[in-house]
Image (tube, rainbow, N blue to C red):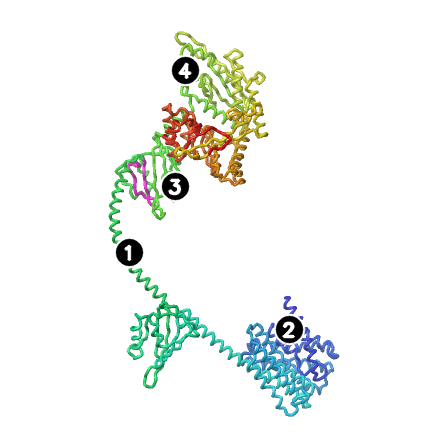
Amino acid sequence: MAFQVAGIVLLTTGYFITGKLGLIFPYMGSSITLFWPPTGIALATLMIWGFWCWPGIFLGAFAINLTTGDLTLPTASLIALGNTFGPILAAILLKQVAGFHNDFARSRDILAFVIIVPSSMLLPSSFGVLALFTSGNLTADQIQQGWLGWWFGDIVGILIFSPLLMVWAAHYKDTTIYSEASKVESVLVITICAVIAWAVFGSGLAIGALKLSLAFLVLPPLIWASLRLGVLESLLAAAVISMIAAWGTAQGLGPFAKGSSSLDHLILCVFVATNSLISCAIIGIQTARRSADRELRESESRLRLALTASKQGLWDLNVQTGEVLVSPEYALMLGYASDTFVENSNKWRDRLHPDDREEVYRIYQEYVNGLREHYEVEFRQLTQQGTWKWILSLGKLVEYDEQKRPLRMLGTHTDIEERKAREIALKESEEALSHSLEELKISENHQRELRVLAEREQSRMGALLAAMNIGILFEDNDHRVEYVNPAFLRMWLVNEHDDLTGMPTKTVLERSTECFSQPVHASKYVLNVKDTHEISERFELELSDGRMLTQLSYPVEDAEGRILGRLWIYEDITQERQTAQQLLYLAERDPLTGLYNRNRFQEQLESLIASCLRNKGKFALLYFDLDDFKYVNDTFGHSAGDTVLVRAAGEISSIVRQIEIFARLGGDEFAILSIILPDEDISALPSRIVTAISAIPLRFHGTNIRLTSSLGVAIFPEHGETTEDLIAHADTAMYQAKTQGKNTWAIYDSLRDDSEAMLQRMTWRNRITQALEQDLFELHFQGIYATSDRKLSHVEVLIRMRDLEQPGHLIMPGQFIPIAEKSGQILDIDRWVMKQSIERLVNDLNLPPLAINISGRTFDEPSLPIYIRNLLMEQNVEPSRLIIELTETAAVSDIQDAQRFIESIHQTGCKVCLDDFGSGFSTFGYLKYLGVEILKIDGLFIRDLKNNRDNQVFVKAIVDVAHGLGKITVAEYVEDEDTFEMVKNLGIDFAQGYNFGRPSKILPK
């Protein structure tokens, strides 16, 4: 839109200015001139820009008419309408009827222009004369002369300016660069045209007055300009001549000034039309010639490109003289410059390869002499670079003399070097194939030998699988059975004579007489896996006869990774499960009474505390022992003492509820955990226990014994929220009951508890807080060495506390760690140790990995793994340089929390070590669920290893289990060389102890 507005404004301005210039040549009055340039500009603009610019024509015409003479507004408007409609009509007829091209390149365009333009200009001349007549500016006897003058003026204006502008618009983007000589010639020719036109039409010599025909002296330079110059320069020369002729005629000079204005105007119009027609006609001829030349050059270029693309060169042989004309591609093919290469038959023959020369020349002679129908031959020619190139030569005789002797032969040379290379390569491939076939025969013989060996190996493998106690089933990709071993049939109680091969895997167990204890659950997993490309999870199946089987499957792939099927493995673990359950029972139970032991009771107490903290519940800890039990034991013997313990445990078991935990803590000490329900009488159970024990009838060696007990009660959370506080307060309450006279019970009374232990615990809490605030902790280090070569593997980080009361004295962790665990300060200590250790790793890049002990309380702190990961990332420390050690007791006490914590540590990239391994038999049952990499065997088994046969057996078992699960073993408390040698012989991977050095602030080397 902005462009169109600017175009209309520009056209209006141009029309107005050129109109003022046209009025310099008046013909009649002030509105009719000898020629009218705006009409030529208007038509050219409509042809170039389009019809949208017509308002510019009307506005320009309206403005010029208002400012010329004394024309009224209606008169100026009517004249402006005529000036607008005339060019629009001409443009419509030229564009839409004649299909006019603005470059005047076609004869039909010139003819259409000559016919349509004068016809269309009848419209503005009629509008103009009518307007002038009706307004009184033109009399009746002036109408004919005025009409003719107006019409001729418009025609002259169009003939001078329209072709010039339209051709300029058609060619202004032409990027042809003219030489200086061409530019000089253009200026010279246009100047000559102007000088001759001036001499004829406008000079004082008035040559044109001698004879009318002398006016056409301007035609020779005009024709010269049209033939020699470009389109725009030619039209410019014609325009210069026409404008000088119009000016001279308007001034009464030249051959056209005869006294009759109408006749003068007509002759001028014919002259201008002749100039334009001659110029346009010659330009059209020149344009057609140039177009033909351009098409010829393009055709030649396409031919050369085709020859280049097809690697061909043309040759033209004079058979009689041996002279040869060749194309540039012919020379370039042989490595020669095309502008200096000269070819003849002798040179061609000399460049032939010695092995080809005789044969090629013979074929040529036979063809020329008429003995061959076609000339086609392949040969090698020597290139300028000294290499041989294969050429395919094709030719045909095309000219003979009167005696039918050949005169001329045309042909092509084609570069077939690549084709020959392929042929040679194909020949070599055929030879290689022949060689490969020979090797294949040898390979077949070798394969036969391998097949015999494979069959033997298959027989041995079949015997091995048949002897195994593990059930094996192999299925193909269609889930059909390919093989089962006898152990599988026995395990599933399938008839050994049944042939299962080819059966759907899912239907195999239908032949089994065994069934599952949980059929719905088992059916989801038996012989079923979601992803055939993955190893299935280990799944346990419990059968109705009490047996326990494990199921595991592996995808079977060939050497290229394609799935062949799946291998299902079944193992009967009934005996191992029973053994594990027995070990677990022994680890949790008191062997004499069958009650929970101290470890199990401790776990239950901690679990109950956690549950009540979450649910805001209450429970009572009942702690009691048998009065004067030592007297019975010493007087009647240990057998009698055992009888008393068993009788007491049996009586109390009969009165405690199933939801209550009853345990023997050791000796004659017992404990009960009882949940306190709302509105429940706390005294009921203690009273029944004291009464029941006193009612037990006992008689040893004829003596009746009256058994009594003293029982203390501590209530959670009133008397403590930790296991240590509750046990300590229940124990205190028991002794408070004894002070009341025994055979009674008492609830803990803090006012009567002035024990030193309570005060000591409070003191240690303050000291730990002081040590954290004043940086009184320090790290000590002890190396862990490989048993194979005694090289340092990693370093365990240990913590010590400096004693402000005794400078130079270090407090060992055994004195403050238990208190810190009870008070919760252990979490702050763990973070301090972690931060200090990572800083050590940052400051010493050669430092081996550090192993840090973490408290069991850490399982309740899920943010610690995030804290470790953030520290490692902030300090840019490789996670593999950090090992986290957890005690076995802490890990096994809450296996789920331990699993989650270990998984979080693994996500940080650190390894995990299970410390004090072996302290509880139950660990064997849970070890496979704990994803630790390192097992550190409890020092209890290492200290006296060389003298204790049982410890040696137990340690060996631990090592075998650990290695079977792919875990590394470490022995601590290796204090002498004999112990080290025994540890090494037992297969332990690493050792730690005084034999290598005591813990120190200095890092070991």
Decide if residue 919 is in sight here.
no
Residue occupying image coordinates x 32% and y 84%: 404
In-image side of 1005 versus 461 (left or right):
right
Q: Distance between the residues labelled 2 and 4?
A: 128 Å
According to the image, label 2 marks what residue? 54
Nearest-to-viewer mark from 1 and 4: 1
Q: For the magenta stretch, what is the residue range?
A: 470-489
Position in image of residue 941 (x %, y %): 41, 26
Report the amino acid beneath label 1. Ser
According to the image, label 1 marks what residue? 436
**Quick check: is 181 in the magenta stretch?**
no
Nearest-to-viewer mark from 1 and 3: 1
Nearest-to-viewer mark from 3 and 2: 3
Nearest-to-viewer mark from 1 and 2: 1
Nearest-to-viewer mark from 2 and 4: 4
Q: In this view, does 74 lie above or below 558?
A: below
> 10 Å neighbourhood of mark 4: few (<14), some, or many (≥20)?
some
Position in image of residue 30 (x %, y %): 72, 81
Q: Distance between the residues labelled 4 and 3?
A: 53 Å
**Circle 3 SS class:** loop
Q: Mark 3 or mark 4, which is nearer the start of the sequence? A: 3
According to the image, label 4 marks what residue? 642
Q: Mark 2 or mark 3, which is nearer the start of the sequence? A: 2
Q: Mark 2 or mark 1, which is nearer the start of the sequence? A: 2
